[in-house]
Amino acid sequence: MGRKIYINYALKDPRGSLYSIYSATNPLESPETEVYTTHLAHLLLKHANHTNNPDQGLRILDLCTGTGCIPLLLCALLSPHIPDLSLQAIDVSPKAISLAKKNLQWNIQHGHLPPSTAQQLHFVKGDILDGSLGRDLQGNFDILISNPPYISSQGFETGTARSVRNWEPKLALVPSKAKNEVSRREGDSGDSGDVFYPRLLDIAEKVSAKIVLLEVADMCQAWRVANMACRHGLWDGIEIWRDWVGTGSFLKTDEMGIRNRKIKMLGEGNGRVVICWSADGGRWIGRGN
């Protein structure tokens, strides 16, 4: 009997090792990632003053970009309305960056993105856990977004589907042991799947981000990351978005307390995103005065 091949990975997995091209208007990342990325874009278009304002630029930094589905989708949603849009996307994997650049060119060639996107979106190789990265980034960014590796080694072996273990690149899902040891510091949660989050919050501070959006694995990790953000002491607001956040039937809101702060949980499903904002950033997404 031959080896079973999962056709969805062989044909379209954007973060796998196979060469894959996908459309910015129909990205092939997990649907939850598409939902929160789209929701963020809709909030910005509704509340921020960047829309059709040539004097108001918007700079977005995507860390652990993989093959670029998040920045490509943001370009598709935002660039028609925000003239001065700039995105920088970083990943440690040379193969991922090469595929991201090919995905960008494919989307431009097939009319899913305008040619100007080639000047707006730049993919760069870089190690998020390298202490020099924050110093090397040029200028400030308004928004930092990241879908980092967030599954612990034990969780990868015992809590993921066999298709994930066999076909998805472990580098994109599980922080390596070496990076885990390098990045551990006082105040970290102790969970090996949380390695990237303190570093991402540090980089957000260095680049003066007004909004930070971090994907997480589940509600338990969401609470740990929200607790890190509270300890960070920089953010005027913090929320947890569940898998299905947006409009219509997905308006369920709960509240719980972390370190004497009220943290709202929006949407349906498991915990999927921790979003933090400054006063300016809160106004851009309808959370400020």
Image (cartoon, rainbow, N blue to C red):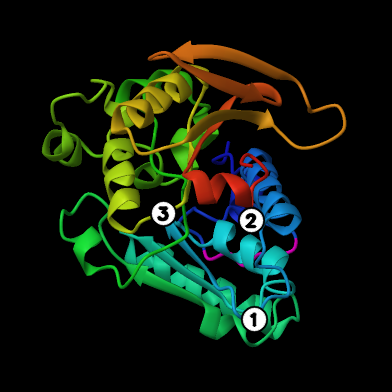
Image position of 219 with respect to 229: above or below: above
- Residue under pointer 2: 12
State the image coordinates of residue 225 (x, y, percent, origin top left).
39, 28
Name the N-terminal-most of marks 3 and 1. Answer: 1
Q: Are marks 2 and 3 in contact (CB under 8 Å)?
A: no
Secondary structure mostly seen in magenta is loop
- Mark on residue 209? 3
As helix, strand or loop, the secondary structure at mark 3 comes to loop
Does residue 142 show up magenta in the picture?
no
**Looking at this view, is 108 or 274 the one in front?**
274
Classify mark 1: residues with Cα within 10 Å, few (<14), some (14-19) or many (20+).
few
Classify mark 3: residues with Cα within 10 Å, few (<14), some (14-19) or many (20+).
many
For the record, the magenta segment spans 19-25
Residue at (68, 76) in percent of width and height:
53
Identity, as a three-letter code, of the amino acid under mark 2: Lys
**Looking at this view, is 168 or 147 the one in front?**
147
Name the N-terminal-most of marks 2 and 1. Answer: 2
Quadrant where the C terminus is found in the figure: top right
Residue 232 visible from this viewpoint: yes
State the image coordinates of residue 62 (x, y, percent, origin top left).
45, 58
State the image coordinates of residue 280 (x, y, percent, origin top left).
52, 51
Q: Is residue 204 left or right of residue 38?
A: left
Q: Quadrant of residue 288?
A: top right
State the image coordinates of residue 233 (x, y, percent, origin top left).
32, 33
Identity, as a three-letter code, of the amino acid under mark 3: Ala
Residue at (87, 32) in percent of width and height:
248
Residue at (36, 65) in percent of width and height:
140
Identity, as a three-letter code, of the amino acid under mark 1: Pro
- Residue under pointer 1: 54
